[in-house]
């Protein structure tokens, strides 16, 4: 789960990382009164959970109250990559001498946290990594040992940071690691960490992505509930019923019981048709769940539905009952192709067929997609 | 022969009294797996499918001589149970559950490495040796005995590949689910190394996916160490970006993780990259696999 | 620093250890209204920071409100081992089937935390350790690895705990370790942890002693300020000025610059005379500090003062100036013997002599004590 | 010869620019110690007593060839600096500061042990080899060269014993302050072992105190491994109980920690237990020490 920038900043502040004085505005008047306190020029940052927010126009500067009023009004009426702006974080725009980058994430292959710093932070950080690798340094952390300022200083020295800032920056990096640990993060990131004209340091952005699987522990120390955090309504609904749903722009509904199988289905479909979504059930299939899955994917207009499920841990015959019940309850007449193999496969086929579903019993998804294409080209096939 | 699971493997099922644990135990037994007992704290003394249930892993090991374990334990308790299992002397562990916190997995991986215990998962369907036995949830009907090894990051896609091969009478030596999590307990090269040394495996299929560096590291390993033919499929070519690891991830990995980066690395290592699962048939026929 | 029982209980409760419903009363009326909420029979526990509180009459049971009123009145008028009772913790007296013991402390020799449990808890736990060692089990913890329920269960099994309680008890022991770690404790202890008649568990006492040296970190998460925690007024004053002061019952004032030296001085004096205190300056001697030390030890009537200091890290000539200034400011006429050796020793001797102090320049403290005894026997010696 | 500190010891002073650090550096130099530089973060490039100051320990080691370090670092920063010093390759570390958190000391001890680094303290006056050199704060005037080793848990009491011996012209080979904290970085037997093997030490004095188990473990070691005469003084016979470790401590240690327990264990190991520091003279004369 990705936290909002302002939530991340509150946590950073609690751990002693310097952050700007700020406030979160839900209205233009809120924004004005916050800026009165924090000062001008003011920065207005849309609190939307999407990458590339700055380049999409979601971050603006206002020099005067008048300008702020106009800017805030405009932002509240904007969609950033399809997401409405409901909250704006307002803070004072400090005079920046230099932008650094600091991040902690997980190196999947070694299974260790890794700290990354760069003396050239900002929006082009990934570019810097390619063009000036000498300005980047990284370090694998042994969580059993911990992570100490002297190690952080070592990383900052290898990245070529000016000696004057090493001690204060290494304290910030160590605190960032503490946050990463305590909040069981996938990423904890400051980009940029700025060196101000007066020589001070300030984290002017805060990225904190928490491991969803650890939420049962972390929720106790989270400032806000996870509700309302997912921008897309359908993705939110997917989370509610307990499946992974990714909204896409096509018109073929897709239900799969496994992320890899779902991706492969999408890849194979993608050569010919365009998926409307990616719905992956995980290992918890029941009749009820599949009933809800059908309801979810049918919230958008679809041309056909493609179902690809395996009976390993999942009772797919139960799932099939839910699908067929939904079809009957709602009079679904769309073409539906299903491949369902594994435990209880024969029983599953019978149930699916009773709902008018075209069942493919061969192993290769390719064959089932062929069937789908044939059906769409000739509905009576 | 096979890798990891063989005639000497004596398996306990942890979480054996749960709904999934008990059903899967029945199926594993039906498939011929040597299951010798189970563990569920507080349920010691009961029986599941005629097998003795113990409260603690050390008791189970003492009483049954078990040397392997498969987990159907709720995600929140996996860390503790994993440590307990290693300390009890079990040498091979399959972690089926999904949603194990990744910070826990990092600790588990570190301890397994220190104690030289082999482990698969989390979020793995487990391991299956056609006609011999299985630990985990792979649906038996899709597999056939033969000489092709499969190692997969995705559970369901490993079924897909085995099923496609079985349909044309090409069997599998061992099918290994590596686990689908960002951090898993054993990396690809470790398992490739076992297949390379297994006299009953003639060729290997890697079923990978976008994200992470497993396939790139596998490519390095294959180029340096493997003589057997290897094919690979990478799922997610048209997928929206999966788990986003932020700038830090992108910086650390560079081009690693993308479909293009992975296929390029694998092809340079001499691996046949399959555009679609069904292409595995042509590859298998070319190498006359059986 | 030892926390009060009720502070420890609040922390235990936050970590999910079951504790009785309770309240802290400063007056008899408070106590009555707490008991009205928590129920009868009620337990009244004096919140004094001293061991053996129960045997000294500081813990009482009241069956009725009338009895509670009388008991509370009596307690508020009692001194427990010389400490007045200012607060009483009131809770419901549960029906107890069995008392267990759980503690985590530091094993100094191995430098590791050690968990100790016993199936025979309660006031006689140390006796049990001697007579029934099979009912006690202990386990050294590797903090790098952590401490997990399965390990806790292993300890409880070796101590012979009934299987039904192992799972819940091991969770409590793991939580106790988390408290021990997070609060940088010297001891975290539950004695007794009771098994109730209904089979539930409850920690009816809470001992938490925090490492004073770690207070700069721990104070951020402490419920209350450390003020007012030290019972003895003089010991409190010693803490304020930054020295270790232990109040004793004799009449010879003692100032030393080192705990070992202080103990040896006390041992040697103790053969003939009785020390009034144990004041150890630590490594921070200044003129001002010694001035304050003199003021502190002279708050009690003394027969003589014995000073034993070494100049290693300490500038003892500075200390000597403070002592002499105090003597002159306050016209002190008591016999004072000082041994002061090490860096700046000659200068120190001159200064001390200028204040009328008898200076012993030999190395052995024994010689200085001989001088003290001689002086007391014959003041003109 | 001597133990731990000898002609090959090249010392840096950490916290050299502080008030205590700079004064003690002067005195250590005056006593003949081979101090080669100092470290204070942020003060790199300056000079103290003519010695170069560095920001980081690794720089200091690289530039000066230092192999030992003495700490005058504020207690809150000792943990970080200690790890840094070990990673920089220093082999012997003396931690003078008091009030280092005990949970930090446990971590330091574990890491030093893993990396096989020898360390004394915290809360130690350090080490002094009469006439040769010293690391720490021992006041030089009280010591004289000779062949008696002293190892003390108390700083000031080590001065007392050295002083009493020096007065009767009995010198010391090496005087070691072990540190007065509940957990210290090296235990008594480790240092006794060094004294037993030191050709320039004829006998050893242990200055202990009530609390903990150091003396009991030392007694075990002496009984099993030492041939040289050993005397011991235990401070605190008439003291009120010191650091109370609760029931758990009492249970773990049993009778260990008390004056009676310690003296009994030492006497059974053949150690001469001294009732008062001044009795060391009679003991030294009996064994004709010098």
Image (cartoon, coloured by chain):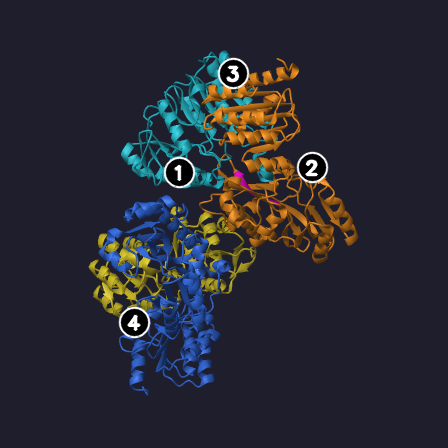
Chain colours: A blue, B yellow, C orange, D cyan
Circle 3 crowding by C-alpha within 10 Å: few under 14, some 14–19, many from 20 = some
Can residue C109 be seen in this snapshot? yes
Toward the viewer: C173 or A342?
A: C173
Residue D128 on the magenta span = no
User: In the image, which is nearer the foreground, mark 3 or mark 1?
Assistant: 3
Q: State the CA–CA distance, disc 1 to disc 4.
A: 54 Å
Place residue C256 in its image quadrant: top right
Marks 1 & 4 on one chain: no
Where residue B259 appears, as percent x and y from the top left, is: 27, 65
Q: State the CA–CA distance, disc 3 to disc 2.
A: 40 Å
The residue at 29%/74% (across/down) is A270
Q: Which residue is mark 4?
A: A267
Q: Which residue is mark 2?
A: C82
Q: State the CA–CA distance, disc 4 to disc 3.
A: 92 Å
Find out whether the residues at labels 1 and 4 contact each other: C-beta distance under 8 Å.
no
Q: For numbered disc 2, what is the local secondary structure?
A: loop
Q: Which residue is mark 3?
A: C362
Magenta segment boundaries in residue numbering: C101-106
Indicate left or right for C171 with C121 as reference: left
Where residue A359 appears, as percent x and y from the top left, is: 37, 79
Quarter placement of the N terminus of chain D: top left
Place residue C229 in its image quadrant: top right
């Amino acid at each position: 789960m990705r936290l909002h920038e302002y939530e991340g900043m509150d946590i950073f502040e609690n751990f002693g990382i310097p952050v700007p004085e700020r406030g979160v505005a839900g209205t233009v008047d809120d924004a004005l009164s916050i800026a009165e306190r924090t000062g001008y020029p003011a920065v207005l940052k849309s609190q939307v959970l999407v990458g590339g927010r700055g380049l999409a126009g979601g971050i603006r500067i206002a020099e005067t109250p008048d300008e702020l009023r106009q800017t805030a009004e405009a932002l509240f009426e904007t969609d950033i990559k399809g997401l409405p702006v409901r909250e704006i974080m307002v803070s004072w725009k400090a005079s920046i001498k230099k932008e650094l980058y600091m991040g902690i994430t997980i190196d999947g292959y070694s299974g260790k946290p890794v700290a990354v710093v760069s003396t050239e932070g900002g929006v082009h950080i990934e570019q810097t990594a390619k063009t000036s690798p000498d300005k980047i340094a990284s370090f694998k952390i042994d969580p059993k040992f911990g992570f100490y300022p002297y190690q952080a200083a070592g990383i900052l020295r290898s990245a070529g940071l000016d000696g004057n800032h090493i001690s204060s920056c290494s304290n910030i990096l160590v605190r960032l690691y503490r946050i990463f640990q305590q909040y069981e993060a996938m990423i904890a990131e400051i980009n940029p960490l700025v060196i101000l004209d007066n020589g001070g340091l300030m984290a002017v952005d805060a990225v904190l992505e928490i491991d969803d699987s650890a939420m049962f522990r972390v929720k106790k120390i989270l400032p806000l509930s996870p509700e309302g955090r997912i921008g897309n309504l359908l993705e939110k609904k997917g989370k509610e019923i307990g499946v992974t749903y990714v909204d896409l722009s096509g018109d073929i509904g897709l239900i799969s019981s496994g992320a890899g199988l779902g991706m492969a289905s999408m890849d194979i479909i993608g050569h010919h048709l365009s998926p409307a979504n990616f719905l992956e059930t995980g290992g918890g299939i029941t009749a009820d769940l599949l009933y809800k899955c059908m309801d979810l994917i049918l919230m958008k207009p679809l041309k056909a539905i493609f179902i690809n499920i395996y009976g390993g841990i999942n009772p797919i015959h139960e799932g099939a009952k839910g699908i067929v019940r939904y079809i009957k309850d709602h009079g679904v007449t769309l073409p539906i192709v299903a491949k369902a193999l594994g435990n209880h496969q024969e029983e599953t086929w019978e149930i699916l067929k009773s709902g008018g579903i075209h069942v493919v019993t061969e192993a290769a998804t390719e064959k089932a997609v062929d069937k789908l294409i044939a059906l769409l080209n000739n509905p009576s096939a | 022969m096979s890798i990891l699971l063989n005639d000497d493997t004596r398996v306990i099922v942890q979480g054996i009294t749960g709904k999934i644990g008990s059903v899967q135990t029945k199926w594993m037994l039906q498939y011929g797996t040597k299951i010798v007992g189970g563990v569920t704290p507080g349920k010691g003394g009961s029986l599941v499918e005629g097998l003795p249930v113990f409260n603690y892993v050390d008791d189970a090991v003492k009483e049954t001589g078990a040397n392997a374990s498969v987990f159907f334990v709720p995600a929140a308790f996996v860390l503790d149970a994993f440590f307990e299992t290693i300390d009890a002397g079990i040498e091979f562990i399959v972690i089926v559950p999904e949603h194990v916190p990744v910070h826990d997995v990092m600790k588990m991986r570190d301890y397994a490495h220190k104690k030289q215990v082999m482990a698969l998962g989390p979020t793995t369907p487990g391991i299956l040796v056609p006609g011999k036995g299985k630990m985990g949830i792979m649906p038996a009907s899709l597999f056939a005995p033969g000489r092709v090894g499969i190692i997969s990051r995705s559970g369901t896609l490993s079924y897909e590949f085995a099923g496609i091969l079985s349909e044309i009478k090409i069997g599998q030596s061992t099918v290994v689910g590596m686990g689908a999590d960002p951090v898993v307990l054993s990396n690809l090269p470790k398992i490739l190394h076992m297949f390379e040394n297994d006299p009953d495996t003639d060729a290997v299929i890697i079923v990978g996916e976008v994200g992470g560096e497993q396939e790139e590291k596998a490519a390095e390993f294959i180029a340096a160490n493997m003589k057997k033919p290897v094919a690979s499929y990478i799922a997610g070519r048209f997928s929206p970006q999966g788990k986003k690891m932020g700038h830090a991830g992108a910086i650390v990995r560079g081009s690693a993780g993308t479909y293009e980066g992975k296929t390029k690395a694998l092809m340079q290592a001499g691996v046949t990259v399959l555009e679609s699962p069904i292409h595995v048939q042509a590859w298998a026929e070319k190498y006359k696999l059986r």
